[in-house]
Image: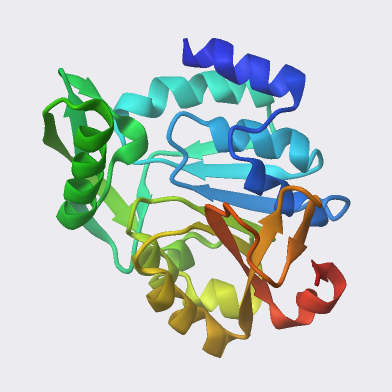
Amino acid sequence: MRSAMLVGQKVLRRPDEPDLRGFAVLSGSAPLIADIGANGGQSAVALSFIVPDARIVSFEPNPVLWRELAFVQRLIGPRFERRQLGLGSQAARMQLHIPTVGGLPITTRASLTPDGAREQAARLEADTGRQVDITAVEVSVETFDSLGLTPTGIKIDVEGYEYEVLSGMVRTLRDARPLVMLECNARDSECLALLEPLGYRRAWFDRARGCLVAIRPAGAGNWYAVPDEMAEQILNG
């Protein structure tokens, strides 16, 4: 089912998350984009046509999704690499908490924090009217700084664990100066407090205008951290 959706997404060039189109500003520079919280590979597929010259490295600790990412590997080809681990503030073995409804794991809502999982479970119960259970699997977590990568762009969607991921990539943010996209959540202020001293400012993708902007448009579900030295070239209004 998901494989058919991913093929359709690629053929129609229609990203599941429109805000990813902000990464188009990196086209032409042969960028490396880190896709942190890959899930079933939908962001990687979108990035493969939004930034057609990019190499994409996806990170996903949930073993349930490794087969789906193997399909994405075949769909995108050699520009895509998948790594079976999570990212955080330190190397560790951790519990990945996965909400389940009727025994079906809702992999898009999995979190490395119990609080994040409970928040997602509450939302699912409100949306579905069904009881949501939480299961856990042990996964490997590393810091991004330990991987020796020099990304041009980074997408982070880890259900409330964004601050920890950023904490483990401070050296990369300081030295490589990547463009970063994060999912909006209750910890945005913590993330911004970490990023601003490193010379980053907040921006959003304006879906109507098709560009990155300094003022938040209505309905934005993600935000970008833009290096100060890049802001003048790519931000509009």
Q: Tell whether 210 sits left or right of 113.
A: right
Q: Tell whether 4 sits left or right of 117.
A: right
Identity of the residue drawn at 85% across and 55% down: 29
State which quadrant residue 115 falls in: bottom left
Rendered view: 154 above or below 187 = above
Is residue 65 something that shows in the picture? yes
Rendered view: 197 above or below 70 = below
The image shows residue 211 at horizontal and vertical percentages of: 79, 56
Identity of the residue drawn at 16% across and 48% down: 118
Q: Tell whether 195 sits left or right of 159.
A: right
- Give the colour scheme of this rendering: rainbow
The image shows residue 42 at horizontal and vertical percentages of: 55, 31
State which quadrant residue 11 falls in: top right
The image shows residue 102 at horizontal and vertical percentages of: 15, 18
Q: How many marks?
A: 0
Q: Which of 196 and 57 is in front in this view?
A: 196
The image shows residue 55 at horizontal and vertical percentages of: 70, 43
**Quarter of the figure with the C terminus:** bottom right
Identity of the residue drawn at 80% across and 38% down: 52
